[in-house]
Amino acid sequence: MIGQLKSINTMTTLYSRSIQLLLLGLLLTPCVKAQDISLSKLNVNTTNSEMAPMVLDSTLYFISNRKSSVLVNVFTQDDQHLYKLYSAPLEPDGRAGKVTLFEPTADQPLTSGPITFSPDGALLITTLNQTRELSSARHSDTENQLRLYQSYKRRDSWQTLDEIPFNIGNYSVTHPSLSPDGGMLFFASNKPGGYGETDLYVSRRTATGWGTPENLGETINTPGSELFPFYHPSGKLYFTSDGHGGMGGMDIFYTTYSTQWSPPVGLEAPINSSADDFSCYIFPDEATGLMASNREGSDNLYQFKYEMIFCETPNEVVEDVYCFTFYEEGDFDKDTVPHQYRWEFSDGVQARGDEVDHCFPGPGFYEIFLHVIDSITGEELYAVANYELLLEETKQVYFSAPDTLPLGDTLTLDAQLMGWGEMEPVQYFWELEENEEIRLGKTIQHIFRKKGTYTIKCEAYWEDNQLCSYRTIVVE
């Protein structure tokens, strides 16, 4: 046999390697689609408008222009109640309890807008009118702009609401969202000099307070309106826009930042629709979220949830091998002329010997040339063979995980769709423990609370395709 090769880890010929790749490709046919999204209205809705959901410590916060007081009611020029901030406890079954005015802003006579909290719940930032006195607002000839105000909790009591000082100029600043580490504050504004009607901005926390706001740029902002940013712990920035060619009206999109913001991706139906869909809150697992929509004629709050049925027979994650041992067992008369074999690989590497090890840089098409040379003069005597080698990535959802993990340690998992080229967008769903909620996200973290052997499953979903992979881990 001339010009054989074997894996450094497992013996195989070039022919058998090709057959294995072919069979693997046949075995990895995508699973039948098993993803659905349920959508249901929250029980806090009224005949008025509800929007801008936010959740902290099993409490739902939202704004509504429902009637807020039997004694004093302030109306807009359109004879609508002003928006106020409300809260309601969330029950384990997903239903909300009694709705009440949010106490720290309950005494505000004018607008109380969307709210955000720091991760520890000790800082809130909300939206109020710049002129907060009712009499002054009624007698003013200028528009009463919106501003961001912050308050700190001291001994279970919220302190005075103070205006964030970068709010200067005749424009509004609203829809705040703090990053999980509390270091970035995203918001929407109609500040002059932007790209459209309203743009998204970010301010970074400094040693002396909030820094100068930065426009997020034209990848996100359009000549239309970008509103309601929500920065998720996964690093995704969700927001509302009517300028990115969605399903109609306002739609919900997300983007991520590496060296720059990625092109926004719209959420699928039924989350987005031909109506206005906006102001979302996504739970940490990304499999459940809240949003507002006027698809039924008025602004209502909805809950959406990804309903997943994992492939029954996922494939185990494999490590692709690109290292081989090449060897020659030809019938050349070694006693006639002192000689050596010279191997040339199309990735630019050469090696000499009856048997050589070589690692290719990765998947791709390669050529291998084998020559016989005079070992004394270095003169090429003749070419033995040349052949082609196609190395392909295994089609799988790849993620790494240790074989064993100490109980209580944090496991970080990062998924990648391998063998399909560049596919966008891809959603990744995880099942880490039986009877536990499905997790959504390219990168997730998990802590196992019991010792045992676990099968971690990850399913990739893109376009109309799905693919499942698994690894087994022992928690000890």
Image (cartoon, rainbow, N blue to C red):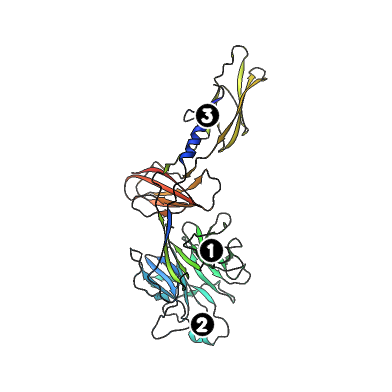
Of badges 2 and 3, nearer the viewer stands 3
Please name the residue shown 51% across and 82% down the image: 78
Q: Write down the residue under mark 3.
A: 15
Please name the residue shown 35% across and 53% down the image: 436
Could you tell me which secondary element the residue under label 2 belongs to?
Answer: loop
The 10 Å Cα crowd at callout 3, few under 14, some 14 to 19, many 20 or more, is few
- N-terminal of the pair, mark 2 or mark 1, is 2
Task: From this view, report whether residue 206 is shown above or below residue 130.
Answer: above
The 10 Å Cα crowd at callout 2, few under 14, some 14 to 19, many 20 or more, is few
Could you tell me which secondary element the residue under label 3 belongs to?
Answer: helix
What distance separates the C-alpha of mark 3 from that of mark 1? Answer: 50 Å
Q: Write down the residue under mark 2.
A: 78
Image spot of residue 231 (x, y percent): 49, 62
- 329 left or right of 84 in image: right
* Residue in front for this viewpoint, 288 or 160: 288
Quadrant where the N terminus is found in the figure: top right
Q: Write down the residue under mark 1.
A: 247
Q: Amino acid at mark 3?
A: Tyr
The label number, if any, that marks residue 60 in the structure image: none
Image spot of residue 48 (x, y percent): 44, 77
- 156 left or right of 194 in image: left
Image spot of residue 125 (x, y percent): 47, 70
The residue lying furthest to the front in this view is 32
Of badges 2 and 1, nearer the viewer stands 1
Task: From this view, report whether residue 176 is shown above or below residue 140.
Answer: above
What distance separates the C-alpha of mark 2 from that of mark 3? Answer: 77 Å
